[in-house]
Image (tube, rainbow, N blue to C red):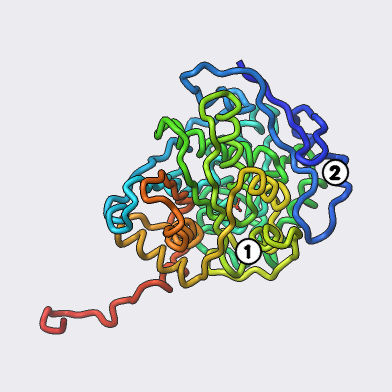
Amino acid sequence: MTNFYYTCSECGRKYNITPDIMVCPECSKMQEPDKPLRGILEVILRGKTDKKLSLTGFLPVDNKYFPNIPVGNTPLWKPAILDKELGFPNLFIKDDTRNLTGSLKDRASYLVAAFAKREGIREIVVASTGNAASSMAGVGAAAGLNITIFLPESAPRAKMVQSLQYGARVIMVAGNYDRAFDLSLEFSRKSKNVLSRNTAYNPLTIEGKKTVSLEIYQTLKRSPDFVFVPTGDGVILGGVYKGFRDLQKLGFIETIPTIIAVQAEGSDAICKAFQRGEFIELDAHTVADSISVGIPRNGYYALKQLKQYNGKCLTVSDEEILIAQKELSSKAGLFTEPAAAASYAGFLNIRAEIPNDATVVLLATGNGLKDIDSAIKGIEFPKKAISSLGEL
Ligand SMILES: *Cc1c(COP(=O)(O)O)cnc(C)c1O
């Protein structure tokens, strides 16, 4: 049996897991404008699970509250041609493009939806660059919840269309994701019985994403050596660490893998802070919209984990991202969105430093059809339509 509570990642105070608390009431008083969130809460797992590793025993909400939908349990597979070409026989892709709404975000939405059900909450609000929104909209639809979304105007159309198809109320924000984040928080504070699913702010977003690590372990039956994680707000990164740390705590694994955060050159707040020790707001610009973040909400906590477990932070250029995206599509049959291809681009950049027999996992975090405007940049369209083969 396991049970759960929150602790503040900064001061260590303990709290019960209830909807009234999102960030540590004490440490969040130190919140500065335009900086990562202070007082991020971490779910602490106490107790034991049986050695068979039942995933539900790892989560703070009882199984019966989860909607019956295909989230998680995504395939971990070897891209055979790439493995051979690159000389890494143990290179794997954790294919989270296969989730219900096409991104890894479903892991967080799934836990948040279950928590809302348990607490009798009917409405969830979220700000997003696109995937968290479409994810919450889809998972929320299946769970019978009302979803309100704050999206920056610039969000890729497919993600907006997805959200509307799932029946969410979409509020378009004149401004960037950071503005949408602030407006959505204001909205959830002013509304009654509404739960925020803002990434990092709701601690269950980090906790939900940890299932990706549990599954990697479940498939490999051991810890991989390296995991490449496309990184914007640093919540997937935090979740990946949390999963391996819980596995370590319960005695399933001995060592935490080397986690490599990959950021876009034009959106590298975490990598910069990793070098300089402080966060400076930047005007994020990258073709990879899902990792385009000026203020990484989980910045402090992500950085702490990277330092504690000897992780690395790398940047890749937009050009490298688009090349990696095309290569994954054309040599592995995996069409990802640019953010998801960043993990592969990062691996290509530092593969000379990685032993060839290492077990390497690339997180493929989102489906390519979610953002065809970016994908178009990496390909050439047929120039004209023909009516006979003679015109070829
Ligand atoms: C959200 C997202 C990321 C980055 O996750 P963070 O928690 O913001 O670091 C990467 N790839 C895709 C496809 C995403 O949707």
In the displayed structure image, the side of residue 92 where residue 302 appears, left or right = right
Please rate how many residues cluster around mark 1, counting C-alpha atoms within 10 Å: few if below 14, some from 14 to 19, many from 20: many
Picture layout, residue 203 above or below residue 218 = below
Quarter holding residue 376:
bottom left
Picture layout, residue 2 above or below residue 337 = above
The answer to which of 369 and 264 lies nearer the viewer is 264
- In the rendering, which numbered label is found on residue 268? 1
Instruction: Please give the name of the residue rendered at 61% of the width and 63% of the height, measured from the top-left corner.
Output: 292
Please say whether residue 272 is visible from this viewpoint: yes
Instruction: Please give the name of the residue rendered at 76% of the width and 33% of the height, measured from the top-left corner.
Output: 7
The answer to which of 364 and 113 lies nearer the viewer is 364
* Quadrant of the snapshot with the N terminus: top right
In the displayed structure image, the side of residue 5 where residue 164 appears, left or right = left
- The residue singled out by tag 2 in the image is 27
Q: Where is residue 340 in the image (x, y as percent from the top left)?
A: 48, 56
Q: Do the numbered discs 1 and 2 sit on residues whose CB atoms are within 8 Å?
A: no
Q: Position of residue 146 (x, y in %)?
A: 63, 42
Give whichever of discs 1 and 2 has the lower sequence position. Answer: 2
Q: Where is residue 138 in the image (x, y as percent from the top left)?
A: 53, 45
**Three-letter code for the amino acid on which mark 2 is drawn:** Cys
In the displayed structure image, the side of residue 375 where residue 380 appears, left or right = left
**Three-letter code for the amino acid on which mark 1 is drawn:** Asp
Under 8 Å from ligand 1: the CB of mark 2? no
The answer to which of 373 and 117 lies nearer the viewer is 373
Instruction: Please give the name of the residue rendered at 28% of the width and 58% of the height, measured from the top-left corner.
Output: 85
- In the rendering, which numbered label is found on residue 57? none
Q: Position of residue 191 (x, y in %)?
A: 79, 44
In the displayed structure image, the side of residue 168 where residue 81 appears, left or right = left
Under 8 Å from ligand 1: the CB of mark 1? no
Label 2 sits on a secondary structure element that is helix
